[in-house]
Amino acid sequence: MSPLRVGVLAYPGCFASEVFAVPDLLTMATHVAAATAQGSVQPAYETSVVSPRRRVIASGGSLLDVSAVRPVDVLIVPGFELSPTVDLDATLAHLGPEVASIRSQAASGTAVVSICVGAFLVAEAGLLAGREATTSWLFADRLARRYADVRVRPERLVVTDRGVTTTAAFSAMYDFALQFVREHDGPGVARRTARIALLDDARSSQAPYVDPELIPTVGREFSLGVKRWLNQNLSARYDLSALAREFRVSTRTMLRRFGDEAGETPLAYLHTARARRAGHLLETTDRTVASIAADVGYRDPGTFSGIFARHTGRRPREYRAMFRRGGDGRAVRKSPAGHPDTPDDAQGPGPREPSPPA
């Protein structure tokens, strides 16, 4: 069989590490496949760095050697520096040739993959309309606001929807690459490649890495007030009507204003806040799972365990074993947060809003 043609789209300001990481891992996987196969093995992948420009200077001033854009089976779009001071409109306008290349490749049947905020380029090309997608949790809200027809899943590491794949930030490119190897070379090759590269091949969520203090707050004063109230009442039974009365609005207005600012429902955020608090307690205390479940508002430990796992990708005991703080008080990773996907069926009866899609 002919090698799978994988092209990485380089452009001015793209992260150089995201240009080469996936091809490098595919090279490693090729060696692993050859070492474990009987007889000779043809290279499974043919990788190239392509661009509609003759000269590309990536992040940090790195000059990249590029080839002209040509037909490939998979096109990978790396991310770029995106900060509060970056003019996104101007950046995307400057990258018009790249957006056109992405659109053209997709029209010819090429599978498109974005790394981190490369999702903005893919969305600008119109490929994410009506699709589920993810990106860095730090910029997920910005992606959702700019492209209202995209169903952004900020808790997911990798999302593939009808031939278009998006990933979370930076290291999620390895989660995609391992998934790609698993699909094309089998789970054995993917597992061995992950071990050689010292990669976690069992991650399923970026929720444990979210730091709410880093998320921009401009224009979200109402939702921030609601969030503060929910944070202060984590153990209370959720009641949408009572919450609306607390802020002197109707339930419909509560859902609309909170949704417009936060991109989710108050109930969805409450699950997030409870998971975050539970993760902190699992990291820093010896309390039982049942005790922690009750502390964050779930009477049934089994229900809590399932909800917690859907937020963080791990059951409470497994999470504690992985993220437990050492004797010096330093945590290995952050407490969980993310976009929940289940109703709080551990609560009693009361007014409810629609739960987020699964």
Image: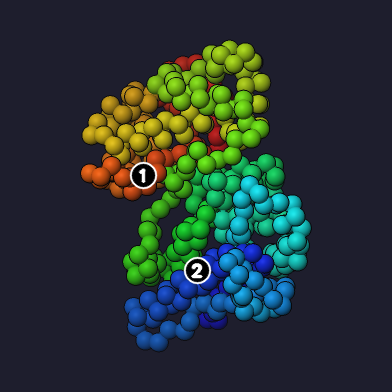
The secondary structure type at the circle numbered 2 is helix
Residue 55 seen anywhere in this rendered image of the structure: yes
Circle 1: is it few (<14), some (14-19), or many (20+) Cα within 10 Å?
A: many
Q: Is residue 14 above or below residue 239?
A: below
Q: Residue at x 67, y 67 (%)?
A: 12
> Is 283 placed left or right of 334 in the picture?
left
Q: Amino acid at mark 1?
A: Arg
Can you give x and y, in whole percent of width and height, for residue 14 in the image?
62, 64
Can you give x and y, in whole percent of width and height, for residue 53 in the image?
72, 74
Q: Residue at x 54, y 50 (%)?
A: 136
Residue 165 seen anywhere in this rendered image of the structure: no
Front in this rendered view, residue 19 or 270: 19
Can you give x and y, in whole percent of width and height, for residue 236 in the image?
42, 18
| Residue behind mark 2 | 21
Label annotation for residue 295: none
Q: Is residue 156 above or below residue 57?
A: above
Q: Residue at x 59, y 27 (%)?
A: 223
The secondary structure type at the circle numbered 1 is loop
Front in this rendered view, residue 178 or 170: 170
> Is 74 placed left or right of 55 in the picture?
left
Q: Residue at x 50, y 38 (%)?
A: 213
- The number of numbered discs placed on residues in the rendered structure image is 2
Front in this rendered view, residue 156 or 118: 118
| Residue behind mark 1 | 314
Among the two numbered marks 1 and 2 on one chain, the one whose residue lies closer to the N terminus: 2
Quadrant of the image occupied by residue 283: top left
